[in-house]
Image (spheres, rainbow, N blue to C red):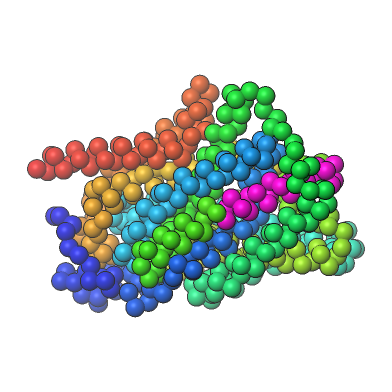
Amino acid sequence: MNATEHSDGSGIHSGVLDAETIRSSSLYNEDLAPIPSSRRSWSTYNYAALWIAMSVNIPTYMLASGMIAGGMSWRQAIFTVFLGNVLVLAPMLLNAHAGAKYGIPFPVFARASFGVLGANVPAILRALVACGWFGIQTWIGGEAINVMIAALVPSWRNYPAGVWICFAVFWLLHVIVIVRGIRTIKFLQGITAPFLLVIGLALLAWAVVKAGGFGPMLAAPSKFHTFRDFFRFFIPSLTGVVGFWATVALNIPDFTRYARSQRSQVLGQVMGLPTTMTLYSFIGVAVTSATVIIFGQTIWDPVQVLARLGSPFAVVIAMLALLLATLNVNVAANLVSPSNDFSNLSPRLISFRTGGLITCVVGVVVFQPWKLLANYSNYIFGWLLGYSGFLGPIAGVMICDYFLVRKKIILVEDLYRRQGFYEFSGGINWRAMSALAAGAGLAFIGLIVPALRVLYDYAWFVGFAASFIVYWAVMRAQKRSAN
């Protein structure tokens, strides 16, 4: 069977299956259904605002400030962040295409390459990473609430359970948002993005004044005395930057399925991601550098920096801004995708909201984010670098399948039924699974064999390339044997 039919623009192909047949499928629910053209309302501004809101957050700040803490100069750190975001933008735009064209979310798109049941493997791998990120962001938000209350009520600092209570309160805010659905998410992104940039610039201005100008702030040289020493730190840091958004590079169809056009989502993402990430990373670099002058030590956690502002009013305003930023990015980046991914496991039993609630529980109970944020090494070299070894191979398989194997043609109705074009072998495309295993295995062997450490340091790139090549080879071999 050759996938050569074309969509009528509604998200459902004409002439094969009627809508009622699809709706009765065990692989279908309203949350995973294709979005018809009439409901695709996201403009260029919505996508730019989405990336501004997702980029202006504490983990972005920590990403760059962690590089300063690790020994980079400010120029080296900013270059690493910019290059990593330009690199990750490429697979992001490639994966975004199918969402905008067919109106389908990530786990449904994955069915085309991994099979209608096999898609659960990449979906759950992506969902678990999102759960970890959800826990990290929620812990940061809880810390911000704790600091804000302590600024208003100093005796609160003496209450040991205070930070855990604040953590629980911020967690409940996410539950409320996920219950209200995707429209609330779009509203939050649209109204807060410009405000969050202003807050970040205000923090930078404060640091400049306190440190006596940009000169003293950015005067610290790199701690690496040779290029070899720098390069040894640079490569895993670059991979960590790519890994930072490798999550959304996979599930970007969850957002582009609402795009008015391909042009809208491409322009919005190009304008929003690299520029905002680089700008906010510069704020993190500059403020972290300033802490050495202002406080006599390098403080890479912005919550701890803001806690030392002195004025209770200033602390409260700053923490409210951080809470808004954290809530925005956490909902958009770490609840939308796993909600769909968990729903994909059993569409009839697990809705978008139920999937979101599962994420809220797993992200806290399983990942224990307070441990991941214990120091910059855990954050960059453990968390970011580690999971990129799984996400790179998934992206390699999906991009190869969509652009080289399928030629951008998908039979949408077959994504929602058993025994269709994407049934493969019992619902699983074992060729895709073998390519995924090959890519991840090659990346992680560097974690086991010290002499091959470079493979792990390049985990996302190694995994992507290996899976892409293996998948292309086995699918071509299948085609030749079929002929």
Find residue 166 and report its horizontal and vertical position in percent. 74, 64
Instruction: Reply above or below: 130 against 343.
Output: above
Instruction: Reply above or below: 36 against 95.
Output: below
Confirm whether the magenta stretch covers residue 177: no
* Quadrant that contains the N terminus: bottom left
Q: Is residue 60 left or right of residue 112?
A: right
Which residue is found at the position 28% from the left and 55% from the top? 112
Find residue 93 and report its horizontal and vertical position in percent. 40, 54
Q: Is residue 324 left or right of residue 106?
A: right
Q: Is residue 416 visible?
A: yes
Q: Is residue 30 left or right of residue 420?
A: right
Classified by dominant secondary structure, the portion drawn in magenta counts as helix
Confirm whether the magenta stretch covers residue 291: yes
Which residue is found at the position 69% from the left and 59% from the top? 201
Extreme-right residue of the structure: 155
Which residue is found at the position 9% from the left and 43% from the top? 483
Q: Is residue 447 left or right of residue 68?
A: left
Find residue 173 and report its horizontal and vertical position in percent. 64, 70
All told, the count of numbered labels is 0
Q: Which is nearer the eye, 451 or 92? A: 92
Which residue is found at the position 22% from the left and 42% from the top? 475
Find residue 272 and report its horizontal and vertical position in percent. 52, 59
Q: Is residue 372 visible?
A: no
Q: Which is nearer the eye, 42 or 437? A: 42
Q: Give, as a single range, the part of the protein colored magenta.
A: 276-296
Q: Which is nearer the eye, 482 or 248? A: 248
